[in-house]
Amino acid sequence: MTHRQTLPPVEAHCQADATIADWLGQAARQRGSAPAYIAGDEHHGWAAVDAASARLACGLMGLGLKRGDRIGVLALNQIEWLQLFYAAAKIGVAVVGLSVRYRDHELLTMLVDSQARAVFTLGQHDGFDFIAMLGRLGPQLPALRHVIELDGSGLNGLAALAGTPLEAGRLSAARRRVVAQDVAMVIYTSGTTGRPKGAGLTHASLLASAAAQAAHTRVVDSDLIHLANPLNHVGGITCGVLTHLVGGGTVVLVPEFKADRVITLMQQYPPTIVAGVPTMLTLLLLHARIASVDFSRTRLVFSGGSNVDPVLLERLAQRMPNATLMNLYGLTETSGALVMTPWQRTPADLMTTIGVPFEGTQWRIAGVNGAALAVGQVGELWFKGVGVVPGYIGAAPGAGFSADGWLQTGDLGTVDGRGVITLKGRKKDMYIQGGFNVYPAEVEALINRHPQVVMAAVIGVADPVMGEVGRAYVIAQPGSTLNELELRGWCADHLADYKVPRQVSLREVLPMTPAGKIHKAALRDELAA
C-alpha cells in the first residue's frame, strides 16, 4: 500500500513558490530586531541578518557569481556561514556545504564534482591550514576562481565583501530570476557506503521540510535552541536554521560540538528545545556540569540518527521532566526531517519506532520489485514529496531513485497498523547468518539497553561456517567492568541465538562521520586492512 497525505494546516506567511530570500525578508519585516541568531556574545536580529546578507549578495555578484553557480563554504557553525547562505540564496547561487573534518581527498572530490567557482574558508582550525591545502589543490580545480578567507581582513577576506555597497536595483533584478526549484544547497552524502554523491537541495525542498517540522514541533517565537549539528548537514541547516526561519525563535550557534561548550551556552541561554543525535545527548547528560543547566522551560527534546535507548530516555526524562521526547528521521536527500514521533506516543514508541511521516509525503515499504508490502513486513523505505530532492548533481544525477521517481533510501523498516514506522537498519548493513537475516539496528538497540553501555555498533563479518556473523563494537561506561562474555550473555538472554554477536570489541572511542553517526565503513576498512 502506498501512503499519500495532504499538507498540514500550517500558517503560510509566504506563497508556495517562495524562495529562502522571500522567507528571510518576511521574517525581517515581521520580527525586526528580535534575535534570530546568537553567535558568541553577539545577537543578530532578523532585519540585521537580511541587510547584511543583501550587501554580501552584492559582493558575490561583484565576483562574477550568478544564478546557477556554486560556492563552497568550509566553516564552523558561525554567523558568516549563514550570511553567505542567505546572500547566495538571494541571487540563485548554491552553497556547497563542506566540513572542517574533510581533508585533501574528500574536498578535491567534492569541489571537482560541484564545479565550485569560489570557496569561503577558515584560515586555520585545530592547527590545520585550509588556505595552504586549497593552494595545493588549486591546479586540479580549473573551475575555482576565488578563495576567500572568512576571518581574513585584507582584500581576499570576507570583511571586504561584506562591506560592499548595496546596489538595490541590481540585487532586485537578480532576486527576480531565482525560483523555488533552483538548487540552494549541495550536501554530499557522508560516503559511509562508497563515493559521496552531491544532493541538490532546492529552495522548495528545504522550505517544505522546514515548514513541516516547524508545524509538527509547534515552533513559536519564544523558542530557543542550541545548534551543534553542523550547518553543512541537514540536521543543521534545515532542522535547526530553516525550521526557525519559518517558525520563529532564536538559534544559538555552537561552533562545533564540545559538551563543555554546549553546557556553558545552555547555562547562559536556557533552551526550550534540545536537539542532537543520541551520541551528543548522551555526552551532554554524562557531563559533570549538567545539573547546573536550567531545563525548566525545555518543552521538547528530539533526537535523530537512531532510536532513543532506555537508559538515554530515562536520563532525559530525569533532567528535562517537562519535555516531550521525539525521534526524528530524515536524510540528505529528503532535505531534512521526514518522519517524527507523534505527540501522542508511548515510551515503547520512542525506543522501537521512528514515528510517522509528515503530511505532504508519499511513502511505502517496498519489496524487492518495488511493490508496497503489507503491515509488519520488512522492506525498503521509499519516499516521494516536495521535501525530496529532484536528484544529485555532477557525476551521479539519477542514482538512488526508481524509474518513476521514488527515493530509495537504503533503509529497511516495517509499518504497523497505526502507520508508525520501525527502522530495521541499512539495507547494506543487513547480514545473513546461517540463512537468517540479521538487522544490526535491532541488535544495537538491545546492546544499548545494557546499563553499562554508552553506545554500540554491529556489523556483519565473513565466517567460513555461518557465511556471516555479527561483530559488535561497544563503548562502556567509564569505570565499567563489562566484558565480552557478559555482553554476549546479555544478548543471548534477549535475542534469538543467531542474532547474538559472535565477536565483541570493547573500545574507548569509535570512528564517527561528520554528521555524528558511527562510521561503519571505517570499522569495515579496519578489519580489511
Image: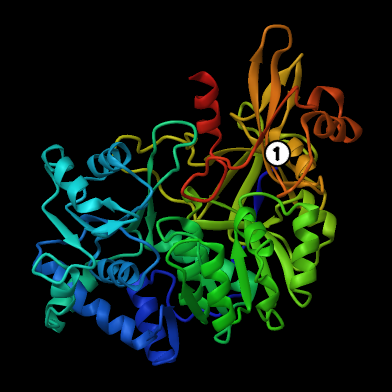
Q: Tell me where residue 399 appears, x and y as whole percent.
A: 42, 34
How is the structure coloured here? rainbow
> In the image, is 199 to the left or to the right of 488?
left
Q: Tell me where residue 138 appears, x and y as whole percent.
A: 13, 43
> In the image, is 473 to the left or to the right of 166?
right
Image-quadrant location for residue 313: bottom right
Residue nearer the viewer, 175 or 228? 228
Query: Dot 1: few (<14), some (14–19), or many (≥20) neighbours within 10 Å?
Result: many
Image-quadrant location for residue 216: bottom right
Instruction: Please give the name of the residue rendered at 70% of the width and 74% of the height, measured from the top-left corner.
Output: 291
Instruction: Please give the name of the residue rendered at 43% of the width and 80% of the height, measured from the top-left corner.
Output: 38
Q: Tell me where residue 140 appears, x and y as whole percent.
A: 15, 37
Residue 100's place in the image compared with 501, above or below, is below
Instruction: Please give the name of the residue rendered at 84% of the width and 54% of the height, measured from the top-left corner.
Output: 348
Q: Is residue 137 visible?
A: yes
Q: What residue is pinned by disc 1? A: 441
Q: Is residue 211 visible?
A: no
Residue type at tag 1: Ala
Query: Number of callouts in the render?
Result: 1
Q: In terms of secondary structure, where does tag 1 sit?
A: helix
Q: Quadrant of the N terminus?
A: top right
